[in-house]
Image: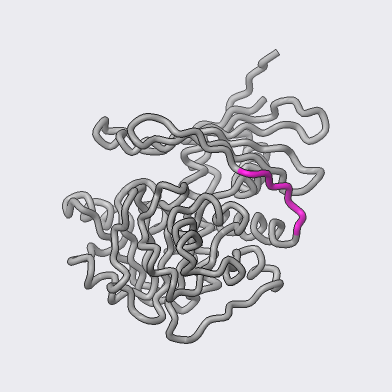
């Protein structure tokens, strides 16, 4: 069995490779080729939640599972909020084939999926704002440098000193007052784990695309549900977003959004759906996360690891 550390993954899995892996993941999902069971969530203390994603990229592909947790209280401990491990099983025997550090994979595969969606929803975006300063915010700044190389990238955080550090490290600029920054952006990406909205509906101007990365559970509502009522709503995977994304769940419960008008990314990539959108309508995009993303990422990472002899081998027998 091959064991790949975070350093191993970083040496192999680039933002560009991640983007192509996510294109395959969501195209296969949209075409009905991938096996994608529901996600498992296990609530924990201090607003933490553990999760399990499992999938096969194709019926004859390896089974891949990611088990991890999101712990917002880790910020006070000086630790990252997200920790996870990915296990890959042999497609024929079911024996463990690899264990991969999941944190490094999650950051890249999640940001790549967002930028893949933005290539469909805002291909000509000139001004991109990332809200947040954690691992996901940093990964998204790097991912947009690949998917939208000509766009100006800015970052906003509650602590200006941290936002400045992130901006300097990732070739971006620091956004000033948040309301003005949201109003000026073509794309706004929310990368927080907030239980309440971090922006207001009124700040979002016509034509803006707002992506929520942190609304991954029913109690995570970093985007105001009222915004959905006047938006074209797109999600990464419809089956999970309707039950797991906080703003979507609230909007459906209030009746302000018709579930039949919610489109997922796979349908856009395969051409089985098109957007019913006025040119002035805002667009909201929700990234809940699905196992096929990890399955696609693991496939390209393992192929590269085997090619270059990266990783440590272990026998669990």
Residue 35 inside the magenta-drawn segment = yes
Residue 285 inside the magenta-drawn segment = no
Give coordinates of residue 206: x percent, y percent.
37, 81
- The quadrant in which residue 202 appears is bottom left
Q: Residue at x 25, y 70 (%)?
A: 181
Q: Horizontally, is 145 left or right of 88 in the view?
A: left
Above or below: residue 65 compared with residue 296: above
Q: Find the magenta span and give its range.
A: 32-38
Query: Among all residues in the image, which is located at the extreme front?
Result: 254
- The quadrant in which residue 89 appears is top right
**Which colouring convention does the figure follow?**
one colour
Q: Is residue 177 visible?
A: yes
Q: Horizontally, is 172 left or right of 99 in the view?
A: left
Q: Looking at the image, which is closer to me, 245 or 185?
A: 245
Above or below: residue 96 compared with residue 286: above
Q: Residue at x 80, y 46 (%)?
A: 59
Query: Among all residues in the image, which is located at the extreme bottom?
Result: 279
Q: Horizontally, is 27 left or right of 41 in the view?
A: right
Give coordinates of residue 83: x percent, y percent.
44, 34
Q: Main secondary structure of the magenta part?
A: loop
- The quadrant in which residue 82 appears is top left
Q: Looking at the image, which is closer to me, 37 or 15?
A: 37
Query: Among all residues in the image, which is located at the extreme top?
Result: 317
Quarter the C terminus occupies: top right
Quarter the N terminus occupies: top right
Give coordinates of residue 148: x percent, y percent.
45, 70
Q: Residue at x 74, y 61 (%)?
A: 31
Q: Is residue 14 visible?
A: no
Q: Residue at x 60, y 49 (%)?
A: 293
């Amino acid at each position: 069995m091959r064991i790949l550390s975070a350093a191993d993954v970083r040496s192999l899995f680039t933002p560009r490779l991640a983007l192509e892996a996510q294109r395959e993941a969501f195209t296969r999902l949209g075409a009905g080729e991938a096996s994608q069971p529901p996600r498992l969530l296990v609530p924990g203390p201090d607003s933490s939640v553990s999760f399990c994603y499992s999938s096969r990229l194709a019926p004859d592909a390896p089974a891949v599972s990611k088990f991890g947790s999101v712990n917002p209280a880790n910020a006070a401990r000086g630790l990252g909020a997200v920790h996870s491990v990915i296990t890959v099983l042999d497609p024929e025997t079911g024996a463990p084939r690899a264990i991969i550090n999941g944190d490094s994979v999650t950051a890249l595969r999640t940001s790549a999926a967002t930028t893949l969606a933005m290539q469909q929803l805002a291909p000509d975006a000139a001004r991109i704002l990332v809200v947040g300063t954690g691992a996901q915010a940093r990964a998204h700044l790097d991912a947009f440098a690949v998917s939208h190389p000509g766009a100006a990238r800015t970052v906003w955080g509650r602590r200006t000193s941290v936002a400045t550090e992130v901006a300097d490290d990732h070739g971006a600029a620091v956004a000033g007052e948040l309301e003005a920054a949201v109003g000026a952006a073509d794309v706004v990406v929310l990368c927080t784990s907030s239980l309440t909205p971090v922006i207001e509906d009124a700040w979002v101007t016509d034509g803006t695309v707002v992506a929520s990365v942190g609304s991954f559970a029913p109690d995570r509502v970093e985007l105001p549900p009222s915004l959905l009522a006047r938006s074209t709503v797109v999600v990464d995977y419809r089956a999970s977003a309707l039950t797991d994304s906080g703003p979507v769940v609230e909007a459906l419960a209030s009746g302000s959004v018709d579930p039949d008008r919610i489109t997922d990314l796979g349908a856009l990539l395969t051409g089985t759906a098109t957007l019913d959108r006025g040119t002035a309508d805002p667009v909201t995009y929700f990234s809940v996360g699905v196992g096929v993303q990890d399955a696609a990422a693991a496939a390209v990472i393992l192929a590269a690891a085997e090619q270059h002899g990266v990783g440590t081998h272990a026998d669990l027998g």
